[in-house]
Amino acid sequence: MSERWDIFCCVVDNYGDIGVTWRLARQLVAEQELQVRLWVDEPAAFVRLCPQADARLAVQLIDGVEICHWPKDFPLVEVADVVIEAFACTLPASYVEAMTERVRKPLWLNLEYLSAEDWVAGCHGLPSPQAGGLQKFFFFPGFSEGTGGLLREGDLLARRRAFQADVQARRAFLARIGVTQAAGTRLISLFAYENPALAGWLDALAADTQATLLLVPQGRIEGDLCRWFGEEQAGVWQRGSVRAQLLPFLSQADYDRLLWSCDFNAVRGEDSFVRAQWAGRPLLWHIYQQEEGAHWDKLEAFLDRYCAAQTPEQASATRDLYRAWNGAGDMQQAWLDWLEQSPALTEWAESWCQQQASRPDLASALVQFYRNWLSCAA
Ligand code: TRH
C-alpha cells in the first residue's frame, strides 16, 4: 500500500498556484507511485489548465490524481501521511484537528513560492511548532544547493529535445494550434501581465529586417496589444515586420510544446517561468508585482544567478532587457542590445537548463524530505 499525500491549493488569482500543484500531484503519482489527492477551491481555474476535467464534479480521477473540490464546509476525510499546504493556504480547521488526533502524526509541509534569493537555503526545511503537538515544515523551491529545487519530470528534457529535433512534430503541433510559420520568421511566445513596456518591444520588432510572429495565449496582455496594433482581424494583428496571433489558452502539455517551439519565450509568474527554462531557449520574465517593490529583490537575485557565468556584455544585455520589461528602462533599446548578443545567449539558455537539471527535482526532494523525517521520527 503506497503512502497517501494530500495537497491543498487555494487559487488566489492567476494560474500559478493550481499550475504548480497540479504538476506536482501528477509527478508524485507517475514517478513516486504515491496516492495523491489534490484539493482545489476553484475548479474552474483547474479546468483551464486541464480541459478534460469537469468543474462540477466533487471528485474525479485524472492522470491517477484524485482531484477533489475543496468546499467551504470541509467533509470529514481520512488524514493523509503527508499534507502539503501550497503557498501558505490555510488548511480546513477540521482537517487540522483530525491531524492532531491521528496516532501517527502526518508530515505537514508548507510549499513556498519560488525565489532565487540567498536567504531561501537558510529557511528551507525549518520546522514551525503548531498547536496540538504538530509541526509544520517550510519547503522552499530554489535554484541552488540547500533548497528544494525546481519541478521537473524525469523524462522532461529527453522529451523536449526529441521534440525540438523533430521538424515534423513541431510543424504538426503548430498546425494543430492554428499556427503557420513562414520561412525565416522568428517565433516568440508572449505570456505576461498588463505591461506598458510592450509598446517599445513592438516598435523594435516592427522595424526589424527579420519578421516576427508573436504567439499570445489569451490573457491579460491583450489590452496592450490592442492599444499598439489597433483593431485585430480574427485574432491576428500585423504592423511592419511584426505579426501577433492570439491563441486559445492551452493545456499545460501543449503550453510546454509552445515553449519548445519558439525561439524566444516571454513568461511570467512562477510555473511558466520555470518551464521556459526547461525549454532551453532564451526567456524573458515578467515577475508578479508585489507591494513595496519586493519583487525587485527577487528579480535581481535571479539575474545574479542566471548571469553569473555570462560575459559582461551578455550579462548587461540580459539584465537591461529584464529590467526594462519589468518597468525600469527602455525596452526598444534593450531589445536591440539583446539581439546583438542573441547567438551566445541562445546557447547560454541550454547550458543554464543543463546546470539546473543536474540538481534533484522538487518532487524527488519532497519524497526524500519525507524519508529523512520518517527515519528521524523512528
Ligand atoms: O498565472 P501566473 O501569473 O501565476 C502567478 C504566479 O504563480 C505568482 O507567483 C503568484 O504569486 C500569482 O500567480 C498569484 O503565472 P504562472 O505561475 O506561470 O502560471 C501559469 C500556469 O498556466 C502555468 O502552469 C502554465 C499554465 N499555462 C497553460 O497551461 N496554458 C497556457 O496557455 C498558458 C499561457 C499557461
Image: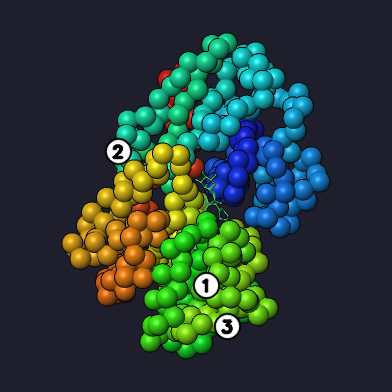
* Nearer to the camera, 342 or 295: 295
Q: What count of labels does the image hold?
A: 3
Q: Which residue is mark 3?
A: 180
Asked if disc 2 is less than 8 Å from ligand 1, the answer is: no
Q: From the viewer's perspective, is residue 97 above or below residue 201?
A: above
* Nearer to the camera, 229 or 6: 229
Q: CA distance from mark 3 to mark 2?
A: 43 Å
**Label annotation for residue 228:** 1
Percent position of residue 316, x then y:
24, 61
- Mark 1 lies on a secondary structure that is helix
Q: Residue shown at 81%/46% (left/top)? A: 56
**Label annotation for residue 118:** 2
- Mark 3 lies on a secondary structure that is loop
Q: Amino acid at mark 3?
A: Thr
Q: CA distance from mark 2 to mark 1?
A: 39 Å
Percent position of residue 248, x then y:
65, 67
